[in-house]
Structures are given as structure tokens and as C-alpha cells.
Amino acid sequence: MVGSTRDDLIELSQYSWQRLWDRMAGLTDEEYFWEPVADFSTLAWRLSHIADFLREERNGPWLGRPVPEVPARGGDPSSAAQALAALQVSYDAWREVLDGTTEQSLAAPIGEPAGPYGTASRRSFVLHVLDELIHHGAEAALLRDLYRASRGGGVR
């Protein structure tokens, strides 16, 4: 049976999230803060960025939903464990918003809350968030591979 566009977006969100979550399993503080070359983004930056856009206050309003109640982030996490916990909270907030959408609401324009992006569909905004999750998740996985390879280990 063919699912709806909404179902496909939720499935892609879950798949992309699970792939990132699995790749970050066992993340150490050393990996988390490792900088492969001077002035190159760390896993700390990537994971914080992912956590930030998944929990942005605009997500609810831009999708015609309320802003989920999530604990405030008290700055950047100081460990890999804290980063992964923040990432999970953020993804749960994103899924709360996404799960509350309907096929009809996703087809509607974002509207006034999005300013110059108001004529874009809510579905296009979901695709934007998923693009961010997918490409920053891939970058995070690559950084882990580079870290392992730099220490004589294999890649995943």
C-alpha cells in the first residue's frame, strides 16, 4: 500500500535520525572535540547545529503547530554524552511537531510566520529540515571515520 506524503516524510525523518543515532553510538569526548585540521568544524559543532535546528522555535509555527515544550539548552554541551542527550531531546521535539501535521496542513503555505518564505509549502520546510539532518548527519559520520582512520582504525 502506498503511503501519504506525510507518512513518507515521517519515515524519512525516522530513517535519517536512526542512521545518525547509530553512527554516534559510543562517541567519546576525544572524538567529539577532535579537530581534524585547524579551523575545521568538529563533531561538537555539527551535533550542536543538528540539535539546534531540530528544536528551533520556528518549527512548530512554520508547520502550523505549537512550539513543543522542551528544556532550554544551557549552552553547548561539555561532553559527548551531554551532546547525545541534547540531540535526543531535540529530535523528540521535531517528531512531536512533524507527527502533528496532516496531509492537508503540509500542502498549505507556511504563511506569515515565515516572512519572505511564507509562500513556500510546509512540506518544503520539512524537506529543508530533513536535508539539514541528512547532510549534517553524513558529515558527522565522516568525521568519525576520519578520526578512526587517523588513529589506524578502520572506517564504518
Image (cartoon, grey):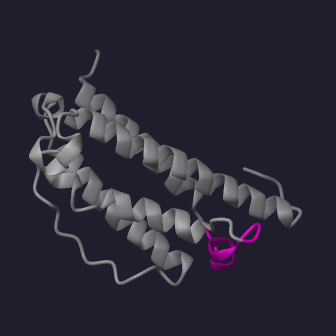
Does 124 sit above or below residue 140? above
Left or right: 19, with 124 as reference point: right
Q: Residue furthest right?
A: 152
Q: Tag count in the figure?
A: 0
Residue appearing at x 64%, y 76% in the figure: 33
Residue appearing at x 59%, y 48% in the figure: 138
Q: Main secondary structure of the magenta part?
A: loop
As rendered, which of 27 and 37 lies closer to the eye?
37
Q: Residue furthest front?
A: 116
| Image quadrant occupied by the N terminus | top left
Residue appearing at x 13%, y 50% in the figure: 113
Q: Quadrant of residue 55?
A: bottom left
Q: Quadrant of residue 131?
A: top left
- Residue 2 seen from this side: yes
Left or right: 51, with 31 as reference point: left
Q: Position of residue 35 (x, y in %)?
A: 71, 71
Q: Is residue 37 magenta?
A: yes
Q: Position of residue 129 (x, y in %)?
A: 36, 46
Q: Quadrant of residue 42?
A: bottom right
Residue appearing at x 27%, y 78% in the figure: 72
Q: Is residue 17 magenta?
A: no
Left or right: 1, with 39 as reference point: left
Q: Position of residue 10 (x, y in %)?
A: 30, 38
Left or right: 99, with 151 as reference point: left
- Residue 10 seen from this side: no
The magenta region covers 26-38
As rendered, which of 122 and 147 lies closer to the eye?
122
Q: Position of residue 132 (x, y in %)?
A: 44, 47
